[in-house]
Image (spheres, rainbow, N blue to C red):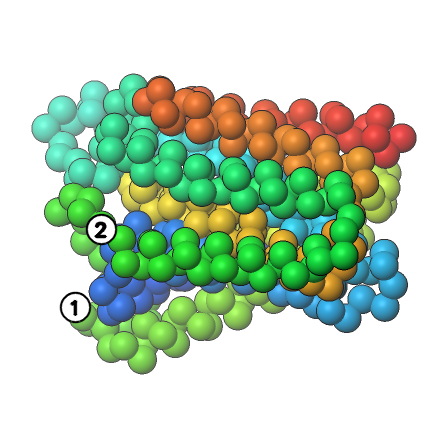
Amino acid sequence: MLHFVLLIVCAVAIYLSCEWFVNAVEWLGERLNVGRMAVGTILAAFGTALPESVVTLVAVTTGATPEAKNIGVGAAMGGPLALATVAYGVTGGMLLLQRRKRRAAAAADPTAARGPEQALGSERALGSERDLRRLAKDQTWFLPVFVVKVALGLVAFAFKPVLGLAFFAVYAVYFWREIRGDHEEDEEGVELEPLKFQPGAESPATWAVVAQTLATLAVIFFASQLFVHQLDAIGPMLGLSASVTALLLSPIATELPEIMNAVIWVRQGKTKLALANISGAMMIQATVPSGLGLLFTSWHFDTALLWSGLITMAAIGYLLLTMRAHKLTPGRLAVAAGFYVVFGLGLIPILG
């Protein structure tokens, strides 16, 4: 019972801290004078991807046995899988709920005004043609990197560890492109909510913005780790093997901050930031943990890891095709979660 109570407490703590984190990171982006999309792809993604990146770093550098080091490899593969399926699926589900609420509100008050971001996703297609091109560009960055990442897990050669540095370089290029890119999105009418640390200040102090960002990150980090430990304990109680818990439940737990951020931003009508946070976190997961794994482990995949890689590529391929065809709707985005169900069903014969 204690594990279940702690699980709920951790989930609530992660959600509340994420709500304060997204509030702080938007002000941080304003202070650093970066584009609104870069707030999601770089600033928010870096913060929410920190817990699982640290898990990989600790596992691959301090693991006493190959099995212990492989925990880091599993985390490096499980993160992108959960983001490409569950995170996008939850975002699509939230958009459908928001659409239903807007329709009900419009029926009750046809004169109610909406901001530009609140209207995003209210049409049949999820966003404008430009929005979809931007989303497709992020996935186009991710997919080739991820394919190489999976291919390297199937081969062995002497200088493979050195290629870990190439993954760091790819993220550096992506980071520079996002920070220096042309962000001309129309953000008129999108106002920042007052900073939680200084609710009465129209323009909060920089120290308060930084303090709120760091404090919420610390809570997210420790609550996420405790959440994962509770899942590890609850899994066997539910009759699940350690392998199933590690491959099926733990990735969702480690990506919970990104999922919570998406829920919060969609609820606030900031769909672009929600999707940017997921795509930015995916780029981090495809490069930084992979680079660490290549440098400090043999980076050799078993059948379960290969299966997770194939499902991730299938999910991103599906999303990329719908984005390029300008047919991505909230409903089609929600379908991405179905790929995680396919992954779970495929694990049954693999682990059996």
Residue extending farthest to the bottom is 207
Depth check: give the residue in front, 136 or 164. Answer: 164
The local crowd at label 2, few if under 14, some if 14 to 19, many if 20 or more residues have their Cα within 10 Å, is few
Q: Mark 2, mark 1: which one is toward the viewer?
A: 2
Q: Is residue 91 visible?
A: yes
Q: Is residue 70 left or right of residue 343?
A: right
- Residue with the mark numbered 1: 202
Q: Is residue 212 above or below residue 103?
A: below
- The image shows residue 31 at horizontal and vertical percentages of 24, 69
Residue extending farthest to the left is 111
Q: Secondary structure at mark 2?
A: loop
- The image shows residue 269 at horizontal and vertical percentages of 29, 41
Residue in the image at 24% along x and 77% along y: 205
Q: Is residue 162 left or right of residue 89?
A: right
Residue extending farthest to the front is 158
Q: Is residue 152 left or right of residue 33?
A: right
- Residue with the mark numbered 2: 182
> Gap in Å between the C-alphas at discs 2 and 1?
27 Å
Instruction: Specify the amino acid type for callout 2.
Output: Asp
Residue 227 occupies which quadrant of the picture? bottom right
